[in-house]
Image: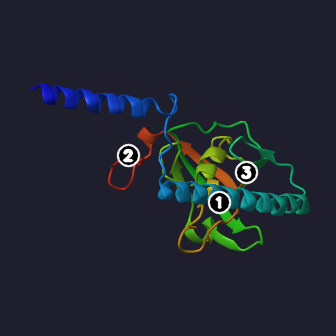
Amino acid sequence: MLVKKLLYITILVVLIVSCKSNNGEQTEIKDPYSKVKTEKQEETIQINKDMLDVNRDIVEKYIARHNWEMTETESGLLYMIYAKTNDTEVKSGDVVEFSFKTSLLNGDVLYDSDATGNRKMTIDRNQEESGLNEGLKLMKKGEKAYFILQPHLAFGVAGDSYKIPPYSVLVYDIEVVDIKSPENEYSDYGEVVL
């Protein structure tokens, strides 16, 4: 019994001494995977920052070429409302119907409501382009605007797997056609469109 107690005390002392051997400092865990992962994350962040800088230069030249006076939001959305009204403002939860033309900075039109029909979007509820959602909230019924969406506000790294290439800056020409509350917006089956 005495031998067991001495053994336990010895083990306890060794553990205490080994814990204090770093003078109270935590021992860094050496995990090569974590180091590589951190380096890759930092590299990816830098690549994205570089791409945003390149895009910013291209976008600034595009805006200058069109003589647009655009405003930039905190998220990076660039917008210009070029036809204003005093009608109903778009607000969170509204179902907004809008006509649109979506193009790249080189002028290639990707989508157009003349061909596909108007779009409807429930503000702050749909999984749509975050920049489009943000821009529509700045508008009123009947207004027309240009939005320029950096990739992080549009379709990002992947594009839309159809017409929009990866990392695309998109230009939207938008007109808010109608604004309805969700309880007044019904599908053909009598269900609320969310």
Q: Amino acid at mark 2?
A: Val
Asked if one can make out residue 62 in the rendered structure from this viewpoint, the answer is: yes
Question: What residue would you read off at disc 3?
Answer: 144
* Distance Cα–Cα, label 3 vs label 1: 40 Å
Q: CA distance from mark 3 to mark 2?
A: 27 Å
Q: Earlier in the sequence, mark 3 or mark 1?
A: 1
Is residue 150 among the parts visible in the rendering? no
Residue 79: % across, % down: 75, 49
- Does dot 3 land on a helix, a strand or a loop? strand
- Give the residue furthest to the front: 3
Q: Find residue 187 and report its horizontal and vertical position in percent.
A: 39, 53
> 124 or 12: which is nearer to us?
12
Left or right position of 15 against 35: left
Looking at numbered disc 1 in the image, what kind of residue is underneath it? Glu
Task: Write down the residue under mark 2.
Answer: 192
Residue for point 70% across, 63% down: 169
Position of residue 102 measured from the top left corner of the image (x, y, whole percent): 67, 65
Q: Quadrant of the N terminus?
A: top left
Within 10 Å of disc 3 (Cα), the crowding (few <14, some 14-19, many 20+) is many
Q: Earlier in the sequence, mark 3 or mark 2?
A: 3
Instruction: Say which residue appears at 68% left-offset and 59% top-offset.
Output: 48
CA neighbours of label 1 inside 10 A, class few (<14), some (14 to 19), many (20+): few
Identify the secondary structure beneath mark 2: loop
In the rendered image, which residue does mark 1 sit on? 43
